[in-house]
Image (cartoon, coloured by chain):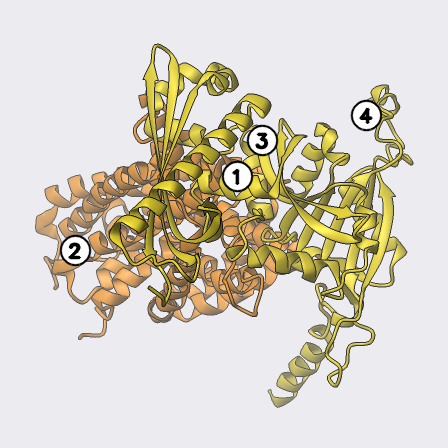
Amino acid sequence: MDKDNYITSYGFIATIIVTVVGIGIFSYPRELAAMVEGDVWLETIIAAFINLILLKLVVAAIRANGFRTITDIIKTKFGSIIGAVILIIMFLPTFFAVSLGMRAFIEVVKMYLLSKTPTEFLIAITIIAGVYIVRGDVKTNIKFNEITLWIMFVPAFIVVLFTLNHTDYTNILPAFRQNVRSYLYALPTAAFAFTGVEIVYIVLPKLSNKKDAFKGIRYSIIFIAIFYIIISITSIAVLTTSETKKLLWPAIDLIRSIEIPGAFVERWDGVVMCLWVIFFFTTFSNGFTYSAYILSDALPLRDIRFSALILAPFIYLVAMYPNNITELYSVIHLIAPFNYVINLLIIPLFLLMLGKSKNNNTRGEEA
Amino acid sequence: MKKAMALVLVFMCIFLTGCWDKVEIDRNAFVSVIGVDVGKDIRNKKALEDVKPGEPFGERDLKRLNVTFAFPDISKYTSQNPEISSDKFVKTPAYSMEDALSNAVSKSSRTLNLGHSELLLLSDELLQYPEQIKEIADFLSRSPLVNRTMYVVMTEGNVEEFFNFNIEMEKTLGTYLTGLMESSKRNASILPVNLNEFLILLGDNGNAIIPAIKIDKDKNEMLIDGIAIIKGYKHVGILSPQDTTVVEMLRGKLISGKKVIYKDKVPIDFEIDNLERKIKVTEDNGKLLFKINIDIEGRIKEYKVDRELFYDDTIEEIEKYFSNSLSEEGQKIARRVQREYGVDIFGFREQITKFMPSTWEKVKGDWEKAFKDAEIDVNVDVKARRIGTRK
């Protein structure tokens, strides 16, 4: 394995999964159940397909440009000044999504775990922890992702097992009874739940086995979709559709309603919440790395450690911006489309067109 | 460099010692039972009528609720004598649940922690006030700290009487009642409902069922008194403990229970091991017909020493008697609930919404009427699988 292409297929898959699955999973069942009732699974599957198509585009775009890093491609194509502007436009949606996601996470923590600790303090220490991991460069991040994948999902699936004796899976019925319009309206919400896939831009060029890149993406998207479906369906099976629609974070209340017969420890939600802090943290650290990585090349900083420090105060400001939880979620919904349109549609299409026309100038595939 | 490091460490020691959310276990009172009763101002609807939403000094001394928080007295708890001797109480009048909580905190030396409560008692009088029940349900579902797995029980009479009642078997009310609920696997006359289920049922359409308890003053006993039926957030009636078994059977929830028939003046006891319920819904000219088919498996527990059971036709005959008797009982109670209360506690509505959505579109406008007019047909098929160790 050479020095530049150090990411294994497993590291690649793990990175995509842990980046995408974040704090959104807590509210995902509510957001979708409110629109399509029990047909959450159907929407999730369609959304996963849409994401796969968009990612295919991204992979094709990077391949057409010889698997160079995204900053490199854009700077050679557009020159350093316009390139820098484009790069900044690219990382801003992710940056906002990460910062607002942090606020959502802090809200959950404040609600269930640390009610008296000031929001400012919680945000500040999470950012500091984030800066620490970003300073280790992409390599550290990938290793961290490889480890946390297990820490995150093994307990999550065990928790789902414990709910089994409270479930009534017929609650997801009746199927296919909503009107077409609500299916269409729900689709963006479901698709945006996969925000974070843009991390592919910075991990793909470093992947050792580039031929199977799309295969890895396919596996990770399928894994995420299955996880979303399991959590949503279990929420509906335990809490019913009408209750799932009313709760802010049904996935947490799902855990709160677990009773393990014969267990001497009550209230497992605290334990699970602590474990699920990692869910957010991986999303945050990877999104942060993505932002810092692109920013460091956009402005001629040349060091991710420096750009991470520059971004940190802005993350804090954006996270503190929404006045309350209602505003927070409306801003989150406002940001998500930008990310998709810019990062997963416009940029790859541009790169694909330009990459094909100027293919002779590139150095060819390195892998 | 070393000095700088040392300085950093010193500062860390100074600044990282505090904790905003520290929980001192000896400063906490873990509430085991929450009892909610009516306050003396509950009928005083006028008091709130002319209050405008933007008016200052909203805090007013309205005693709409009487809330009691009971927590185990751990002052005498030692490792030599690991026993909770009794409960302690904080009782407070309040205008809402949150007000009650803050009143109680201001009255007690410890922080009240609702995270481990086992039981919620609602008095039958309180359940006559739907608006209050809605407020309480909202508080319980909005609060992130309330234990969603605690049991919900209705008391017949003042909640206070139950707190003061001297229970023979256990030292505290919480342990006694949760014990009763948990033993429902062996005793089908209780229908345990936890807060999660209660909130889901109420949230759906304001209807729910919860177990009821009462105090028999003559015998000085605390008794399970069947199921309280709540309709539109209001208590409308009660089903006896004997009916509870049948209701559970009709709901397909019965885990185990006992039934008896008399044949030739001899009681034959039958223990139910397994139960499977299927609902079939058919629609005929806008009239609904619900067919509840119940398959029961079990064992015969007692007969008579000079008679034998070990014959195909004897067992078949007994099975037939049981089937008939249970079908009739089921039919009767289903009809009664349907006609008297008009509350669908059997899950017919879910059945229609899930499996016959087009029919639901037709009847959802006036589901109560559709339910009241519907035909219910109960059909029980009993199979005696075992007869014990005697012929």
For marks 3 and 2, give the one nearer the viewer: 3
Q: Residues within 10 Å of mark 1 (few under 14, many from 20)?
A: some
Q: Do pointers 3 and 2 mark residues of a single chain?
A: no
Seen at 69% across and 60% down, the residue is B176
* Same-chain status of marks 1 and 3: no
The chain letter corresponding to yellow is: B
Q: Nearer the viewer, residue A166 or B164?
A: B164
The kind of residue tagged 3 is Asn
Image quarter (top left, top right, bottom left or bottom right) of the N terminus of chain B: bottom right
Sort mark 4 into few (<14), some (14-19) or many (20+) by Cα contacts within 10 Å.
Answer: few
Q: Is residue A28 above or below residue B234?
A: below
* Mark 2 neighbour class, 10 Å CA radius: few under 14, some 14 to 19, many 20 or more: few
Viewer-nearest of labels 1 and 3?
Answer: 3
Q: Amino acid type of disc 4?
A: Gly
- Amino acid beneath label 1: Tyr
- State the separation of the CA atoms marked 2 and 1: 33 Å
Q: CA distance from mark 2 to mark 4?
A: 60 Å
Q: Dot 4 corresponds to which residue?
A: B54
Return the residue at label 3: B207
